[in-house]
Amino acid sequence: MTVHLSLYQKAEQELYKLDQSVKGQFYNFCHNFRENPDHPGLDLKPLKGDGRIFRAKINRSYRALLTRAGVDAKGRERWLVIAVRHRKDVYEQLSVAINRVTGAIEFVDLSVVGESSLRRAGIDLTPAEPEAEDEPEAAPVEAPVAEAPAPPPAPAAPLLAAYHADDLRDLGVADSLIDLALAVTDSAELDALTAGAPLLSRDVLIGLAAGMPLEEVRAEITQPVRAEEAVDPEDFGAALARTPVTTLDEDIQKILEQGDFRAWKAYLHPTQRRLATRHYSGPARVSGGPGTGKTIVALHRVKSLAEQLGEGHDKPILLTTFTKNLTTDLKARLAYLFDDTPELLDRVEITHIDQLAGRVVGENAAAGRTKARIADRMALRELRELLQELDEHRWDPEFLMEEWEQVILGQSIPTRTDYFKARRAGRGRGVTRMERNEIWKILEQFTSRLDKLGVETWGQTAERAARFEIERAMKVQHRREYKEQIGGLDLRHRDDGSGMRYLHHRYRHIVVDEAQDLRPAHWKMLRAMVEPGPDDLFLAGDTYQRIYNNQVSLGALGINIRGRSTRLTLSYRTTKEILSKALTVMAGQDYDDMDDGSETLKGYRSVLHGPVPDLVEYDFWPDELKGLAKTLDAWKRELATDGKGTARDIRGSLAVCVAERDKVNEVMYYLETEAGIRCSELTKDGPRGNGEVHVGTMHRFKGLEYQKLAIVAASEGIIPPTSRIARLEAEDPARYTRELHKSRSLLFVAATRARDALTISWHGHRSRFLSA
Ligand SMILES: Nc1ncnc2c1ncn2[C@@H]1O[C@H](COP(=O)(O)OP(=O)(O)OP(=O)(O)O)[C@@H](O)[C@H]1O
């Protein structure tokens, strides 16, 4: 073997799309090239424009474009395949360079930047290979009958007129794209220009065009991917080490068969990769809009931590999330990510947060003293009954329930005196000392009522678990201090019989997904479960998607993420069209960053395109159901023509999302009995049954994604549920605002689950969150 051959990330993606036969021939090409790149059959030649790019023959029609990248340790020349193209698409003007910011090799393909940009920049593309003689000529195009020439359109202002070439260069835009980018006049042109652009150029240009200030682009897009060492723009050997590639000494056929699944497994965006692999001096957080890859980063973070730990017999890494059905999803994705190192997966515990709290409480309970857990709505019913029995009408049961959850349980307040002094930040309505006394009395009766029934809420479980874990952490700390005091001597005498010897923090690293929804007590429990220090806690979440009541201030809970917080802005899931509809739901809203600051969706964007979402109004619910069945039928037909013919293939591609629990049954009943469409309900344990269409409440859709999604009953009165919350507007405006936020977030979460197609319908009046 005379050369070492690697494949550029983008070239790999191009290969996936080619016919199986071309993939096979590419495999042979690699084999032959590695043996002898100068073999006459490969016909290796430099392009006339950038002599650093060579073309070589894969078969009669396809060409590999390659560049040299130094020599390897064995003295073999290293070559990089930068693209695989039909020969008609190989132009002399293609260029390759080293990006001065990332230090990686970048391939710039001017043939995909769009006609109008090229025309404006006066660039004429020359095919590297003239048409073959035996190829049928294209039919001559008839000259159109001349019409009176239209007046030339007024020149439009460039989209990035506020910036200079030096700004773009400085931010990392590829040199050959800078003039073109500065001449772009509308977003269609920008899309064409960025579609095939190197990653950093694309991110910077889209960020600036979306209105992100230059300094923010520098801090959030350029800085995270800057090479750590100085970049030599001519050293392709050094640059290869910074470029995402596959080494073709591996079995390329196996890689190609994995197809698109490899997308997130192998190639994280450099910002995502850095977040997943870097060392943090303490708790860190990744935020970002829906579909920006927060979960993917969390999964890779787990893998990177497991690799650092190596094999072992315990599970020092915890991966946890708020919803039960997501835990199943995380388990499957993580198993896929670890498929080549299953022994490392054994070092990870994946548990849903309530289950974890339940286990801690169970471990600490005396035998036979465990309580059954009830959902919050059952507890609320008990509280309502209690208030009726007490003939107590001054207090709204929902307000009391929140006060208990957020203030008393949230801060582990043990006594009435402590409650008098408690912080009630963000609770809205103030309460006097006398009122606190009344509230305490009612809640005391309420908790003893639950106690007598032998039940507790998940909030109580979390709070008790937090207390047990804090005690445990204190014992660990005391033992360590004592050992230090006595000069590091063995503590066998003191430990014997107490189990103390085995006491340590439960985990070395904790990774949390959907962090925005955890309760304060969950955070306290997690904080105590891991020793404070480097890489202790890693959180992924988006407060715009908070759909439960649990607003926290992490700093106040002992989790300091200041300076270790990063936001992702590029959506990999949703199309631009769906995203812009979803963003109108959030227009003008302020959300917190879980740390007494505010969060933003500025720069949140997608580069994918698809149909504009359908917004459909019906007079009555039965009409809407009929319309839904029609939409689903049409989608099924579309999927069939895409090759996803059978019900089995469609499963998991289509879904119907509803705001209210009752409507789920109505939708399923109608679709099954009237429209012959088989459904599966999305439950907290995942989809139940094998139906082709998943149906569930908006809460159940968190973290999931579907190719085509219908949101039904998006009517005013249902979202937000006006009859339930209207009175709060006057009585407790802060709570009213919180309820509206929650409702709005639910619709936002639901709309951003759709990958390609989205329909939102309603009967009566449309939800106030949906603009025309
Ligand atoms: N670097 C990447 N390359 C290709 N696909 C990616 C990449 N990162 C994420 N994705 C894909 O984007 C989709 C969304 O990713 P993910 O679920 O991690 O986003 P998220 O930010 O957690 O979303 P949400 O907040 O809505 O739950 C997934 O299909 C994932 O496979």
Image (tube, helix red, strand yellow):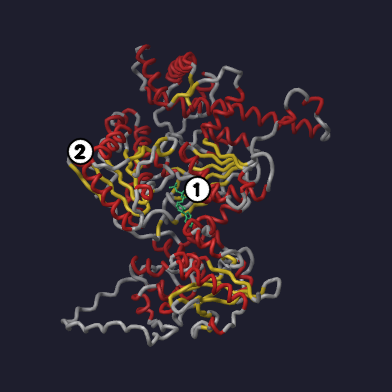
Could you tell me which quadrant the N terminus lies in?
A: bottom right
Residue lying at 39% horizontally and 29% vertically, measured from the top left: 429
User: Which disc, if any, is residue 295?
Assistant: 1
Secondary element type, mark 2: helix
Q: Mark 1 CB in 8 Å range of ligand 1?
A: yes
- Cα–Cα span, label 1 and label 2: 38 Å
Q: What x and y, as percent, mark residue 460?
A: 51, 25
Secondary element type, mark 1: helix
Disc 1: CA contacts within 10 A as few (<14), some (14-19) or many (>=20):
many
Residue underneath mark 2: 622
Residue lying at 49% horizontally and 84% vertically, measured from the top left: 49
Q: Mark 2 CB in 8 Å range of ligand 1?
A: no
Compare residues 715 and 371 and report the one nearer the observer: 371
Residue lying at 24% horizontally and 78% vertically, measured from the top left: 152
First of labels 1, 2 by sequence position:
1
Amino acid type of the residue that numbered disc 1 sits on in the rendered structure: Thr
Measured along the vertical axis of the image, is residue 702 above or below residue 575?
A: above
- Residue sitting at the far bottom: 133
